[in-house]
Amino acid sequence: MAIMRILGGGISGLIAAIQLKKSGLDVEVHEKKGFCGKKTNDFQFLENWTFEDDPLAFLRRIGIESDFYIRPKFSQEFLSPTLRKYEGRSAKPLMYLIKRGSSEDSIDQCLKEQAQRGGVTIKYHSNLRPEGADIIATGIKKPTFVTTGIKFRISHPETSIILLDNNISSRCYSYFIANEGVAEIVCANPSGTRNTAERLKEAVKRFEEILSIRVK
C-alpha cells in the first residue's frame, strides 16, 4: 500500500494524519524539528464565533478526541485606547482556552499521542521536500503579524482582556490572560515592525497600571 506523506507536524498535519490513518491508509508525518507542534508554551483560544459549528463538536465529528487541556470562556473584555470598557457575553462559549507547546496536556502533544496511538509514523529531523509530500502542512512562509510576549506566575482571578491601542499594537492588539495562577501579556504587530521589544514593554506597563499588578 502506498504511504501518504505529510510535510509538517503541527496541528493541521497531525489532524490530517489521524483522519487518513482511520480511513485505512498508511501515513508518515515528516517534521523538520525534533518535536511536533509549537516551540513556545503559551495559551491560545479556539474561536467559537467564526463558524456555526462549535469547534469541539467539529473535532468530534471528524474523529478527533478533545483530550487536551480546554476551558470554555463565556465572556471577553475589550479596552479602547482611553480604557473605555466593552464586554461581550454569551450563553454558549465564545471561545475555548487551550495550551500550546510541549506540555503533556497541550493540543500539540495530545494530537501527537492520538496520531501515534492510531499507528501514524512520525519522522523527526526530516529533509522531505515539498514535491515529495502528498499534503503540505507547514503553515505560511511570511506571517502577516508577529507577537512578542511574557509569561509569569500570578495570583489573579481568571480573565482575558484585549487592549486596542495603535501606539502599542499597530493595527493589531495586545492581550492579558490569567489562568490557574499563570498569566501572559502578548503584543501583536504587523510583520516587519522593528520596535517590537519596546512595544511589549509598553504593553506590560499598561496592563500593570490597568490591573494594579506587578510583573516580575
Image (cartoon, rainbow, N blue to C red):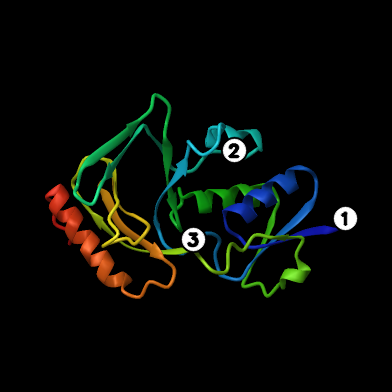
Identify the residue at horizontal 56%, vertical 31% (top origin): 52
Which element is circle 1 on? loop
Residue found at the very far right of the displayed protein: 1
User: Which residue is label 1 attached to?
Assistant: 1
User: Which residue is label 3 attached to?
Assistant: 38
Q: Find residue 99 and report its horizontal and vertical position in percent.
A: 42, 49
Where residue 59 is drawn, which disc sits there?
2
Whichever of callouts 1 and 3 sits on the residue coming sooner in the sequence is: 1
Image side of residue 27 versus residue 184, left or right: right
Which element is circle 2 on? helix
Kind of residue at badge 1:
Met
Q: Are marks 3 and 2 in contact (CB under 8 Å)?
A: no
Relative depth, front residue between 173 and 176: 173
Q: Quadrant of residue 134?
A: bottom right
Identify the residue at horizontal 30%, vertical 59% (top origin): 166
Image side of residue 214 versus residue 175, left or right: left
Kind of residue at badge 2:
Leu
The N terminus: image quadrant = bottom right
Identify the residue at horizontal 55%, vertical 36% (top origin): 51
